[in-house]
Image: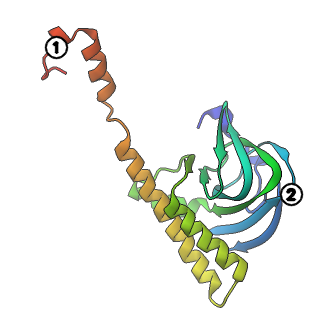
Amino acid sequence: LKKHNIGRPDDLMAVGTFFGATRLQLRSGDFTVSAVTHMHARTVPMHAHAHAFFSMLIRGHYREWFGQEHWDARPLSMVLRPAQAEHRDEIGPNGSVFLCVDIAPAYWDALADSGVRLQRRAFDDRPLSRVALRLLKELCEKCAGWQSAAESLVNELVAEYADESRRARRRDAPPWLPRAIEMLHGDPAHQSLRAI
């Protein structure tokens, strides 16, 4: 995150608070799960949230702007936004429905030793979406034991995020590769493979 994309603490949106209408909400010690709707097209101004949170588009069209970049969500795609990361939103013409999962900083801190990096990432990853849909079902139905089931699903959601983050890091180019390519392009005839 760049410094200018981090909101000031006194301007941050409180946990479980969104610009849309919150239809259902479950609050637990480490997380808050919310079903949020926007009935019509709208542009939501630049803002930031106090906690990191997952957001899944359930229905409708949605574009998120962060800095000069944007992400066009499709139904069942998700994004993880770190705490205090500024973004603005464009809701499509027929409105939209979201599942949002706020997660407390202490929860993320407990994962730091396992190498989980908390960064803004968008996912079209079906395992994450399947877990989030099960969480939405628990939120809507509220059957016996639903709070512990929801807590278990939040843990599963974070575990899927951590696994995907590790897979993405393994796909990243190793730090030495750009320099090796630069050497090859410079004068490959005078470079031994050992030197490269």
Left or right: 196 in relation to 172: left
State the CA–CA distance, disc 1 to disc 2.
63 Å
Question: Who is closer to the viewer here, 39 or 102?
Answer: 39
Of mark 1 and mark 2, the one earlier in the sequence is 2
Rate crowding at label 2 as few (under 14), some (14 to 19) or many (20 or more) other CA atoms within 10 Å. some
On the question of residue 80 being in view, the answer is yes
Q: Nearer the viewer, residue 72 or 27?
A: 72
In this rendering, would 149 be left or right of 38?
left
Residue 91, x across and y down, in percent: 79, 48
Residue type at mark 1 is Gln
Q: By what rule are the colours in the image chosen?
A: rainbow
Q: Is residue 87 positioned above or below 107 on the image?
A: above
Which amino acid does the dot numbered 2 rest on?
Answer: Met
Q: Quadrant of residue 132?
A: bottom right
Residue name at image x 52 percent, y 70 percent: 155
124, 67: nearer the viewer:
124
Q: In this figure, which residue is indicated by the disc labeled 1?
A: 191
Q: Nearer the viewer, mark 1 or mark 2?
A: 2
Residue 7 visible in the displayed image = no
Quadrant of the rendering where the C terminus is positioned: top left
In the rendering, at what x and y percent does residue 45 appear? 82, 41
Which part of the image, by quadrant, shows the N terminus? top right
Q: Secondary structure at mark 2?
A: loop
- Residue 190 is drawn in which quadrant? top left
Q: Which residue is mark 2?
A: 39
Q: Secondary structure at mark 1?
A: loop
Which residue lies at the image location 64% right of the left edge and 81% below the top edge?
A: 147
